[in-house]
Image (spheres, helix red, strand yellow):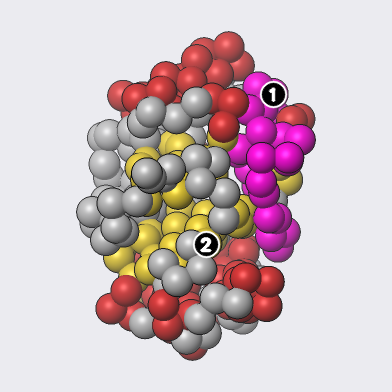
Amino acid sequence: MSGFPINILCETSTIADGNMSFRIGNVHNSLENRKRFLQQNDIDFDKHTCMKCDHGEEIIVVNYDTNEIGATTQEDMIPAEVLVTQEKGLALVLLTADCLPVSFFDPVTQTIALAHFSRETISKMLPAKTITYLQEHFVVDPANLLVNIGPYIHTDSYSFPSGTHNIQPETLPFTEEKNGNFYVDLISACTEQLTQSGVDLSKISVSEINTATSTNHFSHFESRTKNAPEGRLATVLMLLVTS
């Protein structure tokens, strides 16, 4: 459960909904999967906007005049790590397969944001930068924010041989070395930045689903290390139009 009020739609797809990425497999199939998933959530395809992430720091405000609404190709998607809007009925979409899909809602200013927080973007302090952006551009009080973190790879599944990966200073305090491996606690690294930025910990809801062990969710890590099915999940966040 997201912990969001009824005027917010926040859903994440599963393997049963199919791969949502244009970068993997057949593009036509991925497009049809997206259309079907959005339709199942009563979302018009032409009223969604999807970000393409590269582990950067870009925060983009979108509205109905945004050119990339209803993108049907990878090139037409928005290059961003965070999308923000106050438009009702405009669905924000993020594709993940281990990283944290993080949804924000401010009930006071009626602002939503959907963020891609990976090991790289967390190391770039993007969670903290997102809160600062919402404060400066939408007069959001962090204490009012409701936050939902969707399915992600859990710490006990996210490990690297200690001699083969550099751990950034910002995530080092959230990394444990044991049996020759680094184990990265993404959720603690993320929530630390959010709470330090003024978000109330009690208002942060975290999914119990581990993408690395769930048979219903894609995992990039498992597809690379254990030949698991490759694909991307879609998280959709939308302010519903109410009468």
Compared with 156, 48 (above or below) is above
- The one nearer the camera, 76 or 214, is 76
The question of residue 68 being in magenta is answered with yes
Q: Specify whether 124 is left or right of 118.
A: right
* Depicted 119 relative to depicted 30: above or below: below
Check residue 32 in the rendering and tell me which mark sits there, or answer none. none
Q: Callout 2: helix, strand or loop? A: strand
Q: Main secondary structure of the magenta part?
A: loop
The residue carrying mark 2 is 111
* Residue 222 image offset from top left, x and y in percent: 41, 41
Asked if residue 219 shows in the view, the reply is: no
Answer whether residue 164 is magenta in the image: no
Question: Label 2, label 1: how many angstroms apart (C-alpha)?
Answer: 27 Å
Q: How many marks?
A: 2
Foreground residue among 108 and 57: 108
- For label 2, the crowd category at 10 Å Cα-Cα, with few meaning under 14, some 14 to 19 and many 20 or more, is many
Dot 1 corresponds to which residue?
73
Which contiguous range is marked in magenta?
49-74
Residue sitting at x 41%, y 23%: 39
Is there any visible trace of residue 240 in the rendered image? yes
The percent position of residue 179, horizontal first and vertical second, equals 36, 69
- Residue 3, image x, y percentages: 27, 61
Q: Amino acid at mark 2?
A: Thr
| Badge 1 amino acid | Thr
Q: Is residue 62 left or right of residue 98?
A: right
Dividing the picture into quarters, in which one does residue 48 lie? Answer: top right
The quarter of the image holding the C terminus is top left
Q: Nearer the viewer, mark 2 or mark 1?
A: 2
- Please report the residue visible at 51 percent of the width from the left and 46 percent of the height from the top: 88
Q: Give the quadrant of the N terminus.
A: bottom left
Describe the element under mark 1 as helix, strand or loop: loop
In this view, the residue in front, 103 or 21, is 103
